[in-house]
Image (cartoon, helix red, strand yellow):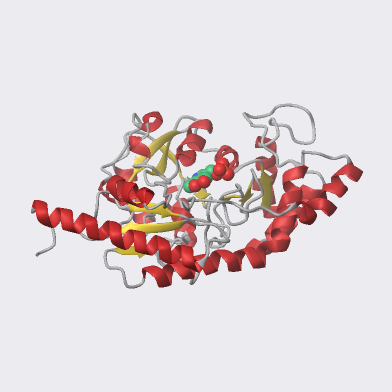
Amino acid sequence: MSLPVAQPRLPPLAALARYLDEIDRSRHYSNYGPLSQRFEVRLAEHFEVAPERVVAVANGTLGLTAALMAAAPPAGSLCLVPAWTFVATAHAVRLAGLIPYLVDVEARSGALTPGIAAAALAAAPGPVGAVVPVLPFGQPLLEPDAGLVAWDEFADRHRLAVVVDAAAGFDAVRPRRSPVMVSLHATKVLGIGEGGVVIGPDAGFSEELRRRLNFGFYHVRLAMVPALNATLSEYHAAVGHAALDEWPQSRRAFQRVALNYGRALADLPGVSLLEGYGERWVTSTAILRLEGSDAPDIDLFAGALAVSGIDTRQWWGRGLHRQPAFADCPRTPLPQTDRLAATTLGLPCFPDLSAGAAVRVARAIASAMGVWREGARQAGAPGSPPS
Ligand SMILES: Cc1ncc(COP(=O)(O)O)c(C=O)c1O
């Protein structure tokens, strides 16, 4: 039987019923109804911030777009985006009226750092107005040099808008001052179907953000600024409440999967999981890195796993610069992005993936590595291991 790469599990009907019943009674379906408002308060508790900083959104992509609009960098300016991210980051930048300027990431973390961004500013082909750092696959950014405090300092020093894409960071991110977007898509650890949340610096930013999420209206029906229609529906807020009710159990389930993978892959040379995954933080993807100069070709490796019935995904493809929609964006050299794209693979990951399944995946990885090394040895390929 083949093992899918993802198999989300959202709260069942029984867990939703009391929240759906509230919608029937309130007859409020969208535009910050009572369930959305209470969902924001509960999210504020989770992120340990004041409730007025939290705004629920229709999805992460539009949340990021609206947050960039609310931060108001000069229209048409460049926005630094790590080339190692999901396409949604750059789509949001374009939707907000900015030009994605693709920059490289740090080798170990796979994240854009303030140091890399500062160097890219000096080489920028035009005025830069904003930066969107990304938490790679939900991994926390590393304090003290590259964490969110360092990004706040970067924003002050360079007078730039910094909006953080923490799409997969529900568990890991602890927002500071710069606005942070977290996705609540079905595939994330706190999945509600389609949804997201933006945590801004203060009530003033939240007010501007709500205007950008609601046709440019605020209090009066006058479109004051360019805007979207991207508020969270009450139905998705209902799922959000039920998902938060279950969060301690679902976090434990994702952690169990991570620790099972950690054990199953511990003795396998040439592969690693992301630092701290399952130990300090959880996410909904199990990301495998191939290491060393004799690492297999990623497509052939994924093909070998597929033959063993293991579904995998190159979640971020080969980097933004290889996506036709962003191939024409200005960019710096991107060697680390290219290296990460050629060595990163998403393994099957869902809350009820068993310990036995993790062992099965590890065995398939070991076998694919063995076949690759033997092939390389016989071909005498450069970098092949000594026989
Ligand atoms: C890095 C990153 N940014 C943005 C998004 C977009 O979030 P959403 O699917 O909620 O629009 C994703 C989705 O997975 C993502 O991985």
**Residue at 65% from the left image edge and 67% from the top image edge:** 249
**Residue at 54% from the left image edge and 57% from the top image edge:** 350
Q: Quadrant of the C terminus?
A: bottom left
Identity of the residue furthest to the top in this view: 222
In the image, 85 versus 374, the foreground residue is: 374
Image height check: is 65 above or below 203? above
Residue 118 in sight from this viewpoint: no
- Rendering quarter of residue 30: top right
In the image, 31 versus 150, the foreground residue is: 31
Q: On the picture, is 161 further left or further right than 229?
A: left
Image spot of residue 84 (x, y percent):
38, 47
**Residue at 28% from the left image edge and 41% from the top image edge:** 332
Image spot of residue 375 (x, y percent):
16, 53
Identity of the residue furthest to the front in this view: 1
Image spot of residue 331 (x, y percent):
31, 38
Q: On the picture, is 235 further left or further right than 179?
A: right
Image spot of residue 143 (x, y percent):
44, 66
Image height check: is 186 above or below 259? above
Q: Please state the total of marks drawn on the protein image.
A: 0
Q: On the picture, is 387 further left or further right than 349?
A: left
Image height check: is 376 above or below 85? below
Residue 212 in sight from this viewpoint: yes
